[in-house]
């Protein structure tokens, strides 16, 4: 078993394996570390989480289990992915999300399709873990700087990154096995801006490559 797959399995399995107080302590330490290393301020990270919960609550109360929607807020910009029954519902959910307090813009990538199965979602979660694992192995940028969301084999990349970091992330994602398409919704910042926002990066390893997937820029 190669290092990338081991890393991916650890990412995928570590969270559910933790329970009770151990889980609380481990989660707290990990969240705290990632919060410090994130280029968003702690206040912005908290605001993004609040936006996600508000949208989730509003969608659940109105549509229940008739839709499958993932809402990912990054720097007040919200990515909507998942499946809905009609173009009308897609538009309604986009409007609902856009009216949420502090939301600046919406990427509405919802698909009019049947709600995906648990098996399909598990496969998407595994793809996400593989991409993140290869970010770590690649060592070309700090892996936590790019948020990965996978829906039906399509990988969405979010983050505050330099052009070099964005290109590296896209290349790694598109050459990861199982990825059908990569959608780039990262925000590009200058190297100077990145230096002002950065803390010292951790040491990383090296990565391999797979067959490339197409890239779509939003």
Image: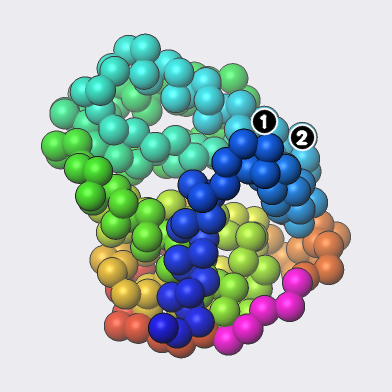
Query: Image quadrant of residue 210?
Result: bottom left
138 up-or-down from 58: above or below: below
Q: Residue at x 36, y 18 (%)?
A: 60
158 up-or-down from 205: above or below: above
Q: Is residue 205 magenta?
A: yes
Left or right placement of residue 27 versus residue 157 in this view: right
Q: Which quadrant of the figure contains the N terminus? A: bottom left
Q: Residue at x 29, y 26 (%)?
A: 91
Q: Residue at x 83, y 62 (%)?
A: 199
Q: Which residues are magenta?
A: 202-206
Q: Give x and y (percent) for residue 214.
A: 30, 71
Q: Residue at x 20, y 42 (%)?
A: 116
Residue at numbered disc 2: 43
Q: Give x and y (percent) for residue 147.
A: 54, 55
Q: How is the image coloured?
A: rainbow
Is mark 1 in CB contact (under 8 Å) with mark 2? yes
Per the image, label 1 sits on a secondary structure element best described as: helix
Asked if residue 61 shows in the view, the reply is yes
Residue at numbered disc 1: 47
Query: Image quadrant of residue 77?
Result: top right
Q: Give x and y (percent) for residue 197.
A: 81, 57
Mark 2, Cα crowd under 10 Å, few <14 / some 14-19 / many 20+, is few
């Amino acid at each position: 078993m190669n290092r990338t797959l081991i890393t991916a399995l650890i990412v995928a399995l570590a969270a559910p394996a933790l329970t009770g107080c151990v889980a609380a302590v481990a989660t707290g330490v990990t969240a705290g570390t990632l919060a410090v290393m994130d280029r968003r301020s702690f206040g912005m990270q908290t605001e993004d989480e609040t936006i996600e919960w508000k949208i989730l609550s509003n969608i659940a109360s109105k549509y229940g289990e008739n839709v499958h929607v993932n809402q990912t807020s990054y720097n007040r910009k919200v990515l909507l992915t998942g499946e809905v029954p009609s173009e009308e519902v897609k538009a309604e959910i986009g409007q609902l999300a856009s009216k949420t307090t502090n939301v600046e813009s919406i990427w509405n990538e919802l698909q009019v399709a049947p709600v995906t199965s648990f098996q399909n979602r598990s496969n998407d979660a595994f793809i996400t873990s593989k991409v993140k694992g290869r970010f770590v192995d690649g060592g070309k940028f700090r892996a936590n700087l790019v948020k990965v969301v996978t829906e039906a084999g399509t990988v969405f990349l979010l983050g505050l990154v330099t052009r070099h970091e964005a290109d590296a992330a896209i290349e790694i994602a598109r050459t990861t096995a199982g990825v059908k398409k990569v959608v780039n919704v990262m925000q590009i910042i200058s190297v100077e801006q990145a230096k002002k926002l950065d803390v010292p990066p951790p040491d990383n390893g090296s990565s391999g490559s797979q067959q490339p997937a197409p890239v779509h820029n939003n």
